[in-house]
Image (cartoon, helix red, strand yellow):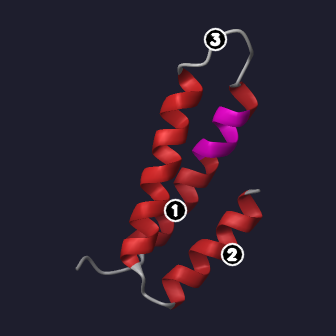
Amino acid sequence: MSYSVELIVNGYVRLNDRAALERLLAHRRELLRQLTSVTGIDPSRAVEQVSQEIAIIEAGLATIAPE
């Protein structure tokens, strides 16, 4: 899914849509928070995936000037 997130982030960067990237980042951070509180299963692969997506989103945000 990281490739999909890369495409989405690249689209938002081209549109200079910082707000959309910030919403996407907030969503992924909340998802990561929820995953780390899961019990009964091993969420490590999902945590790794979401962490990679957060890094991609943060990199995209870094290319857009703050509003």
Kindly identify the residue that appears in the image at 42 percent across and 77 percent down. 63
Per the model, the C-alpha gap separating discs 1 and 2 is: 10 Å
Pointers 1 and 3 in contact (CB under 8 A)? no
Residue 67 coordinates in the image, percent (x, y): 22, 80
Pointers 1 and 2 in contact (CB under 8 A)? no
Amino acid on which disc 3 is placed: Thr
Image quadrant where residue 35 sits: top right
Say which label, 3 or 2, has the lower sequence index: 2
Q: Is residue 45 left or right of residue 29?
A: right
| Residue of label 2 | 7
| Residue of label 3 | 39
Amino acid on which disc 2 is placed: Leu
* Observer able to see residue 58: no
Compared to residue 58, the image places residue 7 above or below, namely below
Residue 21 belongs to the span the image colors magenta: no
Q: Is residue 3 left or right of residue 6?
A: right
Residue 51 coordinates in the image, percent (x, y): 58, 43
Which segment did they paint magenta?
Answer: 46-51
Residue 2 vs residue 40, the one in the foreground = 40
Image quadrant where residue 18 sits: bottom left
SS for callout 2: helix
Kindly identify the residue that appears in the image at 53 percent across and 30 percent down. 34
Q: Residue furthest top?
A: 40
Say which label, 1 or 3, has the lower sequence index: 3
